[in-house]
Amino acid sequence: MPSLVSSASAAAPRSPSASEEKASGSCGTVPDDHGDAVKVSGLKGQASCSSARSIAKTYGHPKAVKTSCHPSGRECEYGVYAEAWRCTGIFQDSFYCWLGGDAKGRGARASFYGLIISGRLLDLTEHRPPCTRHALTKGLRDGGLGAQIDRDAFGCAGHFAWAGAVVHHDGTGDEITVLLKAGRGSWHPVSRGRFCEDGSVPKKIYQPACESN
C-alpha cells in the first residue's frame, strides 16, 4: 500500500528570493498611490528589486521634471525621483527608469522597465485640472469640439470626466456624451470605446460617462 504524505510534511510553495527575482529581471507587481498596478521588469545593473519597486510606487510624483534634448519636446522629458533615479514619461503604458549615466540613460549603473497594468496613470507629474464647466468646455474646444456643456451635465472622478455637450449644426443642437481624460494640466476628449471597455473609467462616473448617448 503506498504511503501517504501528510500536508504538514509536504513541501510548501516557496516565494522567490530577492536574489532570484533580480537574476530573472522581474520584481513583481506593486500598487502605486494612483490606485494602479505597476509591473517591474527588465532589472539590470546594481539596483535591487526593493529599490526598483520603491521608485515604481512613486512614479508620477517626481521631485523635478527636466528635458534631455533641445528643443524641448514631450518625448525628451524625464522625471527625477529619490536616490537620483530618473524615469521617462509613459509610452504605450510603459516607462523606463535608470540610475546614473547621462540624461538619456547612457552609461546607467542600473535600470528597469515599468508596465502600467490598468493604464490610468498620468504622464510624469500631472495633476488633475479643475472639475469645472469652464475647464471642461476649454478641453472640448481644444479638442476640436465646438460644443457647450448643458447646464450642470458633467462630473469627474480620478483622472476622468464626462460632459453632456451640445453640438450645434444646421440651426439645431444635439447633445452628445464626451469622455475626457486629464493630461498636461488640462482635459482632453478621449475614446469612450477604449476607456469604458478596459475598466479605466471610475465607477463613480461610469454610468453617465459610458452608458448614456
Image: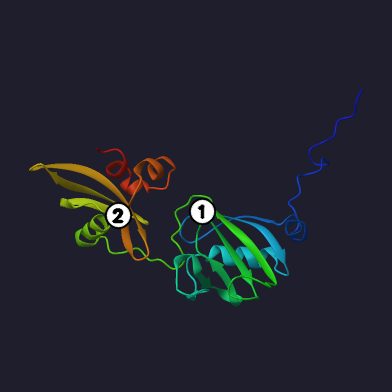
Above or below: residue 55 compared with residue 6: below
Q: Position of residue 125 (x, y in %)?
A: 44, 68
Q: Residue at x 50, y 63 (%)?
A: 89
69 or 175: nearer the viewer: 69
Q: Residue furthest top?
A: 1
Q: Quadrant of residue 133?
A: bottom left
Image coordinates of residue 25 in percent, x first then y, are 71, 57
Q: Mark 2 sits on what residue?
A: 156
| Mark 1 and mark 2: Cα distance apart in space | 22 Å
Image: 69 above or below 184: below
As rendered, which of 40 and 102 lies closer to the eye? 102
Residue that sits furthest to the front in the current view: 71
User: In the displayed structure, does residue 202 sit left or right of residue 38?
Assistant: left
Q: Residue placed farthest to the right in the image? A: 1
Side (left or right) of 207 relative to 106: left
Instruction: Give the mark nearer the N terminus: 1 vs 2.
Output: 1
Q: Give the labeled residue for mark 1.
A: 93
Q: Residue at x 19, y 52 (%)?
A: 146
